Image (spheres, rainbow, N blue to C red):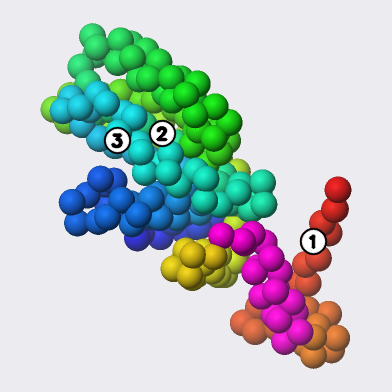
Protein backbone atom coordinates (compact mmCIF):
# COMPACT_ATOMS: atom_id res chain seq x y z
CA UNK A 1 0.00 0.00 0.00
CA UNK A 2 1.14 3.53 -0.77
CA UNK A 3 -0.63 6.79 0.06
CA UNK A 4 -0.15 10.03 -1.87
CA UNK A 5 -1.76 13.27 -0.63
CA UNK A 6 -2.62 15.85 -3.28
CA UNK A 7 -4.26 19.28 -3.08
CA UNK A 8 -7.73 17.81 -3.59
CA UNK A 9 -7.65 14.18 -2.52
CA UNK A 10 -5.75 11.33 -0.94
CA UNK A 11 -4.75 8.65 -3.46
CA UNK A 12 -4.35 5.14 -2.03
CA UNK A 13 -2.62 2.54 -4.20
CA UNK A 14 -3.03 -1.12 -3.27
CA UNK A 15 -0.78 -3.73 -4.84
CA UNK A 16 -2.54 -7.09 -5.01
CA UNK A 17 -0.79 -10.29 -6.01
CA UNK A 18 -1.77 -11.67 -9.39
CA UNK A 19 -4.71 -14.02 -9.72
CA UNK A 20 -4.24 -17.75 -10.22
CA UNK A 21 -1.35 -17.87 -7.77
CA UNK A 22 -0.21 -21.35 -6.73
CA UNK A 23 -0.07 -20.04 -3.15
CA UNK A 24 -3.84 -19.42 -3.00
CA UNK A 25 -6.96 -21.50 -3.44
CA UNK A 26 -9.58 -20.57 -6.08
CA UNK A 27 -11.84 -19.31 -3.29
CA UNK A 28 -9.09 -17.04 -1.93
CA UNK A 29 -8.49 -15.72 -5.44
CA UNK A 30 -12.20 -15.00 -5.82
CA UNK A 31 -12.43 -13.11 -2.52
CA UNK A 32 -9.28 -11.12 -3.29
CA UNK A 33 -10.73 -10.03 -6.64
CA UNK A 34 -14.03 -9.16 -4.97
CA UNK A 35 -12.31 -7.02 -2.33
CA UNK A 36 -10.18 -5.27 -4.96
CA UNK A 37 -13.03 -4.43 -7.31
CA UNK A 38 -15.36 -3.40 -4.48
CA UNK A 39 -13.19 -0.65 -2.99
CA UNK A 40 -11.14 0.57 -5.98
CA UNK A 41 -11.75 3.41 -8.40
CA UNK A 42 -9.33 2.08 -10.99
CA UNK A 43 -8.26 -1.57 -11.30
CA UNK A 44 -5.09 -2.22 -13.31
CA UNK A 45 -4.70 -5.81 -14.47
CA UNK A 46 -1.25 -6.28 -15.97
CA UNK A 47 -0.18 -9.59 -17.42
CA UNK A 48 2.02 -11.11 -20.09
CA UNK A 49 -0.61 -12.48 -22.42
CA UNK A 50 2.06 -13.79 -24.76
CA UNK A 51 2.13 -16.97 -22.68
CA UNK A 52 -1.62 -17.53 -22.86
CA UNK A 53 -4.42 -15.92 -24.84
CA UNK A 54 -7.12 -17.88 -22.98
CA UNK A 55 -8.65 -15.02 -21.02
CA UNK A 56 -11.75 -16.99 -20.01
CA UNK A 57 -9.63 -19.15 -17.72
CA UNK A 58 -7.49 -16.24 -16.54
CA UNK A 59 -10.53 -14.19 -15.52
CA UNK A 60 -12.45 -17.05 -13.94
CA UNK A 61 -11.92 -15.59 -10.45
CA UNK A 62 -13.40 -12.30 -11.68
CA UNK A 63 -16.45 -14.09 -13.03
CA UNK A 64 -16.86 -16.22 -9.91
CA UNK A 65 -16.85 -13.13 -7.68
CA UNK A 66 -19.52 -11.38 -9.77
CA UNK A 67 -22.39 -13.23 -8.11
CA UNK A 68 -21.42 -12.78 -4.45
CA UNK A 69 -22.26 -9.16 -3.58
CA UNK A 70 -25.06 -7.33 -5.34
CA UNK A 71 -23.78 -3.99 -6.69
CA UNK A 72 -27.32 -2.60 -6.63
CA UNK A 73 -27.50 -3.25 -2.88
CA UNK A 74 -24.04 -1.72 -2.36
CA UNK A 75 -24.09 1.56 -4.32
CA UNK A 76 -20.92 2.91 -2.65
CA UNK A 77 -18.89 -0.05 -3.94
CA UNK A 78 -17.92 -1.29 -7.41
CA UNK A 79 -17.16 2.14 -8.89
CA UNK A 80 -14.02 1.17 -10.79
CA UNK A 81 -12.92 1.01 -14.39
CA UNK A 82 -11.06 -2.18 -15.30
CA UNK A 83 -7.90 -1.46 -17.27
CA UNK A 84 -6.30 -4.44 -18.99
CA UNK A 85 -2.60 -3.79 -19.59
CA UNK A 86 -1.02 -6.06 -22.17
CA UNK A 87 2.72 -6.15 -21.62
CA UNK A 88 5.51 -5.90 -24.18
CA UNK A 89 3.56 -4.96 -27.30
CA UNK A 90 5.47 -3.49 -30.22
CA UNK A 91 3.99 -0.55 -32.07
CA UNK A 92 3.07 -2.55 -35.18
CA UNK A 93 0.93 -4.99 -33.15
CA UNK A 94 -1.05 -2.50 -31.03
CA UNK A 95 -4.24 -2.33 -33.11
CA UNK A 96 -4.40 -6.06 -33.75
CA UNK A 97 -3.87 -6.90 -30.07
CA UNK A 98 -6.54 -4.42 -29.00
CA UNK A 99 -9.08 -5.83 -31.48
CA UNK A 100 -8.29 -9.40 -30.44
CA UNK A 101 -8.85 -8.82 -26.75
CA UNK A 102 -11.89 -6.62 -27.31
CA UNK A 103 -13.48 -9.48 -29.22
CA UNK A 104 -12.64 -11.97 -26.47
CA UNK A 105 -14.17 -9.82 -23.75
CA UNK A 106 -17.26 -9.31 -25.89
CA UNK A 107 -17.64 -13.10 -26.05
CA UNK A 108 -17.49 -13.31 -22.25
CA UNK A 109 -20.27 -10.71 -22.03
CA UNK A 110 -22.38 -12.63 -24.54
CA UNK A 111 -21.87 -15.96 -22.76
CA UNK A 112 -22.51 -14.70 -19.23
CA UNK A 113 -25.13 -12.13 -20.27
CA UNK A 114 -26.27 -9.95 -17.35
CA UNK A 115 -24.09 -11.93 -14.92
CA UNK A 116 -20.80 -11.02 -16.64
CA UNK A 117 -18.20 -9.53 -14.32
CA UNK A 118 -17.49 -6.51 -16.55
CA UNK A 119 -21.05 -5.24 -16.20
CA UNK A 120 -21.63 -6.28 -12.59
CA UNK A 121 -18.31 -5.39 -10.98
CA UNK A 122 -17.22 -2.49 -13.19
CA UNK A 123 -20.45 -1.06 -14.58
CA UNK A 124 -19.35 -2.00 -18.10
CA UNK A 125 -16.27 0.24 -17.91
CA UNK A 126 -13.35 -1.57 -19.57
CA UNK A 127 -10.22 -0.23 -21.25
CA UNK A 128 -7.50 -2.20 -23.03
CA UNK A 129 -4.01 -0.70 -23.18
CA UNK A 130 -1.18 -2.37 -25.13
CA UNK A 131 1.95 -1.40 -23.18
CA UNK A 132 5.27 -0.97 -25.04
CA UNK A 133 8.41 -2.90 -24.19
CA UNK A 134 10.50 -1.39 -21.41
CA UNK A 135 13.40 -0.47 -23.68
CA UNK A 136 11.23 1.87 -25.77
CA UNK A 137 10.71 5.58 -25.22
CA UNK A 138 6.94 5.09 -25.26
CA UNK A 139 7.05 2.85 -22.17
CA UNK A 140 6.92 5.77 -19.73
CA UNK A 141 4.59 8.00 -21.75
CA UNK A 142 1.53 5.89 -20.91
CA UNK A 143 1.77 6.62 -17.19
CA UNK A 144 0.29 10.04 -17.94
CA UNK A 145 -2.61 8.28 -19.69
CA UNK A 146 -3.31 6.24 -16.55
CA UNK A 147 -3.19 9.40 -14.42
CA UNK A 148 -5.75 11.09 -16.68
CA UNK A 149 -7.96 8.01 -16.45
CA UNK A 150 -7.71 8.10 -12.65
CA UNK A 151 -8.60 11.82 -12.61
CA UNK A 152 -11.81 11.00 -14.53
CA UNK A 153 -12.95 8.51 -11.90
CA UNK A 154 -15.59 9.55 -9.41
CA UNK A 155 -14.34 9.96 -5.84
CA UNK A 156 -16.05 7.15 -3.96
CA UNK A 157 -15.14 8.07 -0.36
CA UNK A 158 -15.56 11.57 1.01
CA UNK A 159 -13.08 11.16 3.88
CA UNK A 160 -10.11 8.97 4.75
CA UNK A 161 -11.91 7.77 7.87
CA UNK A 162 -14.87 6.62 5.79
CA UNK A 163 -12.55 4.76 3.43
CA UNK A 164 -10.75 3.06 6.31
CA UNK A 165 -13.98 1.97 7.93
CA UNK A 166 -15.29 0.66 4.60
CA UNK A 167 -12.18 -1.47 4.16
CA UNK A 168 -12.39 -2.86 7.68
CA UNK A 169 -16.10 -3.57 7.39
CA UNK A 170 -15.74 -5.25 4.00
CA UNK A 171 -12.85 -7.43 5.20
CA UNK A 172 -14.88 -8.51 8.23
CA UNK A 173 -17.91 -9.33 6.07
CA UNK A 174 -15.83 -11.39 3.63
CA UNK A 175 -14.20 -13.31 6.48
CA UNK A 176 -17.60 -14.05 8.03
CA UNK A 177 -19.17 -14.93 4.66
CA UNK A 178 -21.71 -12.17 5.25
CA UNK A 179 -23.11 -11.25 1.84
CA UNK A 180 -25.64 -8.71 3.10
CA UNK A 181 -25.65 -5.08 2.01
CA UNK A 182 -22.69 -3.06 3.24
CA UNK A 183 -24.88 0.02 3.54
CA UNK A 184 -26.82 -1.53 6.42
CA UNK A 185 -23.63 -2.22 8.38
CA UNK A 186 -22.32 1.28 7.62
CA UNK A 187 -25.63 2.84 8.71
CA UNK A 188 -25.42 1.09 12.07
CA UNK A 189 -21.86 2.36 12.53
CA UNK A 190 -22.92 5.88 11.54
CA UNK A 191 -25.76 5.80 14.08
CA UNK A 192 -23.34 4.84 16.86
CA UNK A 193 -20.90 7.56 15.77
CA UNK A 194 -23.62 10.20 15.76
CA UNK A 195 -24.72 9.19 19.24
CA UNK A 196 -21.17 9.70 20.47
CA UNK A 197 -20.99 13.12 18.78
CA UNK A 198 -24.25 14.45 20.20
CA UNK A 199 -22.76 16.29 23.22
CA UNK A 200 -20.26 18.21 21.09
CA UNK A 201 -22.77 18.84 18.29
CA UNK A 202 -25.44 20.21 20.64
CA UNK A 203 -22.94 22.37 22.48
CA UNK A 204 -20.96 23.80 19.55
CA UNK A 205 -22.76 23.00 16.30
CA UNK A 206 -19.73 21.07 15.09
CA UNK A 207 -18.96 17.37 14.92
CA UNK A 208 -15.31 17.92 15.89
CA UNK A 209 -13.52 20.84 17.55
CA UNK A 210 -10.00 19.42 17.83
CA UNK A 211 -7.61 19.79 16.06
CA UNK A 212 -9.84 21.70 13.62
CA UNK A 213 -13.49 22.65 13.52
CA UNK A 214 -15.39 20.04 11.53
CA UNK A 215 -18.91 21.10 10.46
CA UNK A 216 -21.84 18.76 10.75
CA UNK A 217 -22.76 16.96 7.55
CA UNK A 218 -26.21 15.61 6.80
CA UNK A 219 -26.91 13.25 3.92
CA UNK A 220 -30.50 12.75 2.84
CA UNK A 221 -31.30 9.47 1.12
CA UNK A 222 -34.41 9.01 -0.97
CA UNK A 223 -36.15 5.67 -0.78
CA UNK A 224 -37.82 4.69 -4.04
Horizontal and vertical percent position of residue 180: 61, 61
> What stretch of residues is rendered in magenta?
179-196
Question: Is 179 left, or right, of 205 in this rendering?
Answer: left
Q: CA distance from mark 2 to mark 1?
A: 32 Å
40 to 182, vertically: above or below: above
Q: SS class of the residue under badge 2?
A: strand
Q: CA distance from mark 3 to mark 1?
A: 41 Å
Check whether the beta carbons of the residues at disc 2 and disc 3 lie within 8 A of each other: no
Quadrant of the image containing the N terminus = bottom left
Whichever of labels 2 and 1 marks the residue nearer the N terminus, that label is: 2
Q: Which residue is the site of mark 2?
A: 83
Q: Is residue 182 covered in magenta? A: yes
183 to 206, vertically: above or below: above
Question: Is 16 left, or right, of 219 in this rendering?
Answer: left
Residue drawn at point x = 25 percent, y = 35 percent: 47
Q: Which residue is the site of mark 3?
A: 58
The one nearer the camera, 119 or 219, is: 119
Q: Residues within 10 Å of mark 1 (few under 14, many from 20)?
A: few
The mark closer to the camera, 3 or 1, is: 3
Q: Which residue is the site of mark 1?
A: 219
Question: Is 205 left, or right, of 156 in this rendering?
Answer: right
Horizontal and vertical percent position of residue 87: 23, 29
Amino acid sequence: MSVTPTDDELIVALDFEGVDSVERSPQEDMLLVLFNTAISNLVLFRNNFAFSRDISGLFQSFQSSASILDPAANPTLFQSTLVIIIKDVVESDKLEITREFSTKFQKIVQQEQDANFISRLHGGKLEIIPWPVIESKEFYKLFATLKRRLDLQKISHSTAGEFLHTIKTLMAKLKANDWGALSQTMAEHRARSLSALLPIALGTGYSEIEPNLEPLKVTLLRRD
